Image: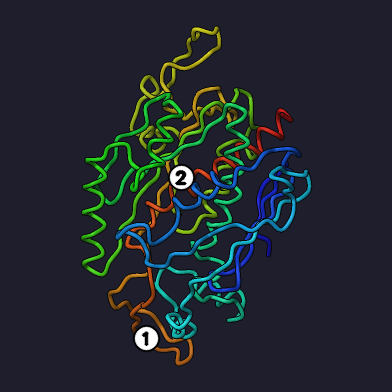
Amino acid sequence: MASQFGERVRVSIFGESHGPGIGTVIEGLPAGEIVDFTSLQRFMERRQGGRNALSTARKEPDIPRVVSGIFDGRTTGFPVCLMIENANTRSGDYSNLLDKPRPSHADLSAFVKWHGNADMRGGGHFSGRLTAPLCAAGGIAKQILGRRGIFVGAHLSSIGNVQDEPFPMVPDAALFERIAEKPLPVISDARGEEMQREVAAAREALDSVGGSVECMILGLPAGLGDPMFDGIENRLARVLFGIPAVKGVEFGDGFALTQMRGSQANDPFCYDETGAVRTQTNRNGGILGGITTGMPVRFRVGIKPTPSIGQPQKTVSLRTHAPAEIEIRGRHDPCIAQRAVPVIEAAAALVALDVLLCDSGV
């Protein structure tokens, strides 16, 4: 089994939640690219637990250690390997899960596939902990893209029934930076306060709540991607669905387009001030026929409620083949969506860099 993706920029993720460490191998990065580790650390801190009362109490330093591929602060052209130590594990919280699989977790499916041999402490290789090395790889990709005038940003689009304001059709990259600096990555601070109350109520009830993340890629040139099975949507969706708890992805206006007529859903073409063809609206999310149009690429990701909740839940005993009940201990997020924002950015940046190098070689 290999947890990897990419054509020109190939990314592999390895490790388990409660093993000695986790990490990533990135192949295909151009040589001579500067890696600002101070900026990379700030980016990775955005997905850490323990930042506020709305996230898990498990806080790891998440400092990536360079094993290979970066010398004197620049990429060498050889595979980049980054390791991140697991320093704050409490495996005893998961001792009963070998017999009683947690509802809506991968415990049962992993047991069936690997006959109980997988290390499932803390969720093992299925854990959201594995998004830390994904962020490390994506943070480097974001830096490389930024030097080419391509910027990736995201915000918490919703938690429960509370909706944030949407991105403008063509946002300024500075908006991405302002959102990234906030404790809760939203456009509207008033909506953010409502979201916090929604999460706090779920936590008080020993429950959890889902949410969604809106992401945009600015500056991708027109003509990238391929029709049918290698389109931009396909490449993004493959990586996005590899992020734990992601259950849906829509591009542009997505499922809302099904409620429109063609006269409403179509994006009329026009010329901008530079003479380039653009669209007056962006309901199709900057992608037509799997190929970029030059408009911002826009998509939204749906994230399910954290399946680890404090309420008693029905399960089965794999040992006795009888019904059972489970109360999940440990440190868990009442809402995963807020910490997923930089992870979505990382995934989008890696796909954008891969397709850019594949199609243009720049």
In the displayed structure, does residue 42 sit left or right of residue 221?
A: left
Q: CA distance from mark 1 to mark 2?
A: 35 Å
Work out whether 322 lies above or below 204: below
Which numbered marker is on residue 249? 2
Q: Give the quadrant of the N terminus.
A: bottom right
Find numbered disc 1 in the image and state the secondary structure of the residue it sits on.
strand
Mark 2 Cα-neighbour bin, 10 Å: few <14, some 14–19, many ≥20 = many
Q: Position of residue 50 (x, y in %)?
A: 38, 62
Work out whether residue 285 or residue 153 is closer to the camera in this orientation and state it: 153
Residue 359 x/y as whole percent: 70, 30
Determine the residue positioned at 48% across, 13% down: 269
Q: Nearer the viewer, residue 59 or 195?
A: 59
User: What amino acid type should be assigned to the residue bearing mark 2?
Assistant: Val
Q: Earlier in the sequence, mark 1 or mark 2?
A: 2
From where the camera sits, is residue 281 visible?
A: yes
| Residue closest to the far front | 72
**In the rendering, at what x and y percent does residue 271 appear?**
50, 8
Q: Which of 220 and 299 lies nearest the eye of the viewer?
A: 220
Look at the numbered disc 2 and give the secondary structure of its residue: strand
257 versus 87 height, above or below:
above
* Disc 1: which residue: 323
Across the whole image, how many numbered discs are drawn on residues?
Answer: 2
Q: Is residue 237 visible?
A: no
Identify the residue at horizontal 25%, vertical 52% (top origin): 196
- Coloured how? rainbow
Which one is in front in this view, the residue at disc 1 or the one at disc 2? 2
